[in-house]
Image: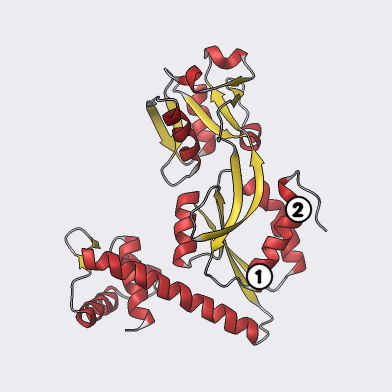
Amino acid sequence: MEFRTLQAFVEVLRRGGFSAAATALNSTQPTVSKAIKQLEDELRTPLIDRSRMSATAAGEIALKRAQAILAERDDLLRELGELRGLKRGALSLGISPIGGSTLFAPLFAVYAKRYPHIDIRLQEQGSRRLEEMVVEGEVELAASLLPVGEEFDFQPVRTEPMMALLPPGHPARARSAAGVAAFRDTPLVLFDSAFAINRLVEDAFSRRGVTPVVAARSGQIDFMVELVAAGLGVAFMPESVAALHRHPAVAAVRFAEPRTDWRLALVWRKSGFLSAAARAWLDLTAEVYPADTRPTTPS
């Protein structure tokens, strides 16, 4: 069993096909197909259902093991690199479009100035997908929402209240805060399924015994605000994000429900090795956002 065959197997399932996997691996489709066949022959069982391009029952088991093995390989290479006193390195970092650019953009220039030989490899995805990428070893650190699973360690970054963005004519516009009861009969405009922020809103409605009607889902903040302005429904965003995307037709009031604060943290695998580059990013983040307070100015 070789790393290249495991990588090909993971990429085929991740990309949903042999051609896409070959492109991602800078390889050819026949080479990838041969690698998968070699792995299946070695394990003596089919791993991929070719008709649906999905994992078989055995493939599901093999996928989890393959991802863990590849993540451990990456940890080994990083750790050995630092042991050799590697001067150059890379930081693989994942951030979410929701608040990530606002909070972390000022840090990039400071980090680049302090560590000019570190290459920052940035992934921008929803929090749920970023957590998967951390587990799979695609990124060392990722921004996600608390609480997170037991497989992660984390460092809190920022806590903000959640705001409800209201369309024209909504009766709650006259208030400073409103709970689920005010939105019982209002459709929701939610982020798409890759974003963990939905969990905060959906859990709040569930605790009140309300099943909301979802009018639309999107990963684009500006588009969601425009949908609210057009009267489609109500959206929910962290306070700083709502402030950056003000619209003359949209009112923002605090979402007055318990356990709905937006609690952003940097997360990493509990069992994983953190490179010096990753530890430096954590240190800088703690310097700028000490004890989850207002940001300071780094030098």
Q: Tally the numbered discs.
A: 2
Q: Position of residue 237 (x, y in %)?
A: 56, 34
Foreground residue, 92 or 258? 258
Amino acid carrying label 2: it is Val
Q: Is residue 176 above or below residue 83?
A: above
Determine the residue positioned at 48% across, 56% down. Answer: 131
Distance from Cα at disc 1 to Cα at disc 2:
17 Å
Residue 87 appears left or right of 196: right
Residue 2 visible from this viewpoint: yes
Give the class, few, some or many, for how many residues have Cα within 10 Å of label 1's Cα (few <14, many ≥20). many
Identify the colour scheme used.
Answer: secondary structure
Q: Is residue 55 above or below residue 232?
A: below
Amino acid carrying label 1: it is Ala
Q: Position of residue 81 (x, y in %)?
A: 60, 83
Residue 27 visible from this viewpoint: no
Residue 52 appears left or right of 207: left
| Picture disc at residue 189 | none
Q: Quadrant of the C terminus?
A: bottom right
Q: Quadrant of the N terminus?
A: bottom left
The answer to which quarter of the image holds residue 52 is bottom left
Determine the residue positioned at 26% across, 79% down. Answer: 39
- According to the image, label 1 marks what residue? 277
Direction bottom: furthest residue: 84
Residue 251 appears left or right of 148: right
Secondary element at image label 1: helix
Q: Position of residue 161 (x, y in %)?
A: 63, 34
Determine the residue positioned at 44% across, 30% down. Answer: 207
| Picture disc at residue 288 | 2
Residue 240 appears left or right of 33: right
Q: Position of residue 233 (x, y in %)?
A: 46, 23
The answer to which quarter of the image holds residue 7 is bottom left
Foreground residue, 260 or 110? 260
